[in-house]
Amino acid sequence: MTASVSSAPPVAERSKHPFLTYDMICEIPETVSRTIDISNDHLTSISEKLKEKTRFYFTGCGTAFFSAMLGSNILSIKEKGSLDAECVQALELANHHSIAQNSATFGVSHSGITKTTIDALCAAKSAGSYAVGITHFADRPIERIANQTLVVGNGPDKSRCHTKCYLAGALPLTQIITRALAQRRSAPDGRLQDLQEGVKELPGLARKVLASTEPIMRELAKKNAGKQTFYFAGTGGSYANALEAALKIMETSYIPAQGFETEQFLHGPWVSLDEHSVLFVMATEARTNERSADLVKAASGLGSTVIALVNEEDRKMATICNNTVHLPLIDEQLSPYLSIIPLYLFSYYLCVERGNNPDYLRYLTPAYWDARTIIFPPGTH
């Protein structure tokens, strides 16, 4: 369902819960498990090509760009000066960015045909950068452009509201970068080993999170279906989750939603909070927990519904927040791989409560399908 040559709007495969989007969310543990295995098969060959590179670029569009953000966040553990890296949106990388010659560029595209991402990889490759593609489809243009391509996951996302592919796009980057840092001895060996072991735990923990948080998020979605605005705030890798979760609300419920880095939200946007708004605060990063707590207290005082996602050992947040969702304890660099699951469940059930079909965005309405064909001509997305 990712690409279509038809000018007619799609016909809904399902008209009620469980929609295809729900199935894809439930497949997250399996797609994570399969992606880990696929990435492991390619780590040695990719790492060999990267060991002399001095700069990394990460790119994509939409959910795929947020995947690039999440996967590349692992670089925050590197020692200063070990290598430089940037996460750049594909249109900017292709048209407005200077690309270093002795570099590597990672492009994430679920379909493998996203024109803007392909253009970015072409520009990078022309500049002398080693291009790595990450996709869910074999034999797509991204394979012909990239020097090396990983086809990840346990099959393509069957919903146009992409969910499971978000983590499948990010995980290979986390694994590749962890190996690259180990090769260069650019981070403490113990920390890298902990991360490698933590990645192995992700499929099992994801299953646990699915089971434990679904009833909570379903009830929260039901209670807040009539709210007018939705905000998401996080730091580190959780910032990517904030952007991705807001996108999912907009794609499926067609209402205002925004994702922010926590401090950025505290510098102005917070004044739009009121009793008609819902705020999710991702507070699994210990170094920024105090600022997350400040946001929770302020938003609660303004009458907003505040939902905090925290580690299972965190009991302090419950004293200041009425809605606290506890997640299994894992290295904070990997915690976003778990916290996105309840956010997906919330956006899904909010959509269902509002009477929408999450599988097709708004494409079932002819005017929106016509607009899509302008934005994405057949074969370009």
Image: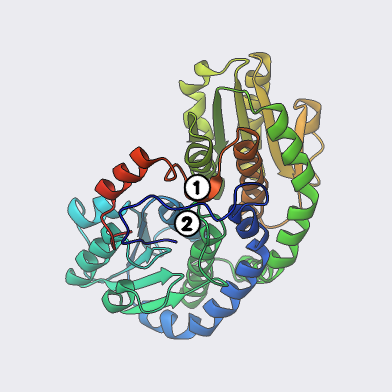
Q: Residue at x 32, y 72 (%)?
A: 142
Secondary structure at badge 2 equals helix
Residue kind at label 2, given as amino acid type: Ser
Above or below: residue 101 compared with residue 66: below
Asked whether, in this view, residue 347 is left or right of residue 58, the answer is right
Above or below: residue 354 compared with residue 9: above
* Residue 77, numbered circle: none
Q: Which residue is mark 1?
A: 240
Q: Is residue 236 visible?
A: no
Tag 1–tag 2 contact (CB < 8 Å): yes
Asked whether, in this view, residue 228 is left or right of residue 126, the answer is right
Instruction: Give x and y (percent) for residue 342.
Output: 68, 46
Q: Residue at x 51, y 75 (%)?
A: 179
Q: Nearest the camera: 301 or 140?
A: 140
Secondary structure at badge 1 equals helix
Q: Which quadrant: the N terminus?
A: bottom left
Residue kind at label 1, given as amino acid type: Ala
Above or below: residue 130 compared with residue 224: below
Q: Which residue is mark 2?
A: 67
Asked whether, in this view, residue 95 is left or right of residue 10, the answer is left
- Colour basis: rainbow
Q: Residues within 10 Å of mark 1 (few under 14, many from 20)?
A: many
